[in-house]
Image: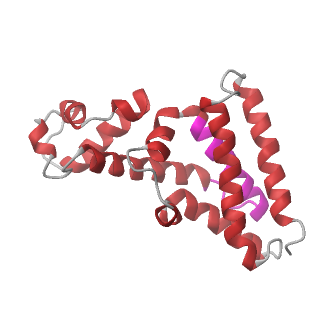
Amino acid sequence: MAYHHGDLASALVQAAVELAREGGLAAVTIREATRRAGVSPNAAYRHFPNRAALLDATAAAIQQGLAAAMTDAPDRSPAERLHRIGAAYVDFALDEPGWFAVVFFGIRPPDPATVREAPAFVALTAALDDLVVAGDLAADGRDDAAWACWATVHGFAELCVRGPLAGVERGEQRRRGDVAIRAVIAGIGSGHA
């Protein structure tokens, strides 16, 4: 992908997204992103003063794609949407481990305030808000439910990507993930209406 007079920052982020897909966090460097964009490394510094800034922009771009996958079925019930959000998160980790690493294990892992603004977390809380409106979740339990849901899918994803479930066949990983997602949805809904 050669850059031709346009938005160099976007071209560099796109190159970095491709690098992350291929090799995770270690593969994303300013030098390689500029090489792929067809510009000198010095050209990047006007947009990204260091690698951390490029990684932050790359993680934000990847998060947008994750959020889009999580919200691709708006016509489902609130519980079904919540299930889809969890399944999309697990699929993201399994299908794109390089992206998963950049988003969640970059140079500066996200803090709770940053997480709340992340597109994926916004999608999760919107689905939980719909559960509140439907009477399936108490409003004062929504914040705890959000962290419980995320902890479940993120922890399960980690078990599959870098833990004891890494060697398990993909279909079985997804089946076990589905069980975990259904359990957390049932748990946040029980006794909270």
Q: Main secondary structure of the magenta part?
A: helix
Q: How is the protein colored in the picture?
A: secondary structure
Q: Quadrant of the N terminus?
A: top left
Q: Report the number of numbered marks.
A: 0
State which region is magenta. Answer: 71-93
Which is more toward the observer, 139 or 162?
Answer: 162
Which is more toward the observer, 104 or 98?
Answer: 104
Residue lying at 62% horizontally and 46% vertically, measured from the top left: 89
Q: Position of residue 10 (x, y in %)?
A: 26, 49
| 56 inside magenta stretch | no
Q: Position of residue 21 (x, y in %)?
A: 43, 32
The answer to whether residue 73 of the structure is visible from this angle is yes
188 sits to left or right of 49: right
| 84 inside magenta stretch | yes
**Image: 146 above or below 142:** above
176 sits to left or right of 5: right
Q: Quadrant of the C terminus?
A: bottom right
Residue lying at 18% horizontally and 50% vertically, measured from the top left: 49
5 sits to left or right of 138: left
55 sits to left or right of 153: left
Residue lying at 54% horizontally and 54% vertically, measured from the top left: 67
Q: Position of residue 106 (x, y in %)?
A: 41, 44
Q: Extreme right residue here?
A: 191
The answer to whether residue 77 of the structure is visible from this angle is no
Q: Position of residue 137 (x, y in %)?
A: 80, 72
**Image: 139 above or below 159:** below
**Image: 32 above or below 106:** above
Residue lying at 37% horizontally and 39% vertically, measured from the top left: 17
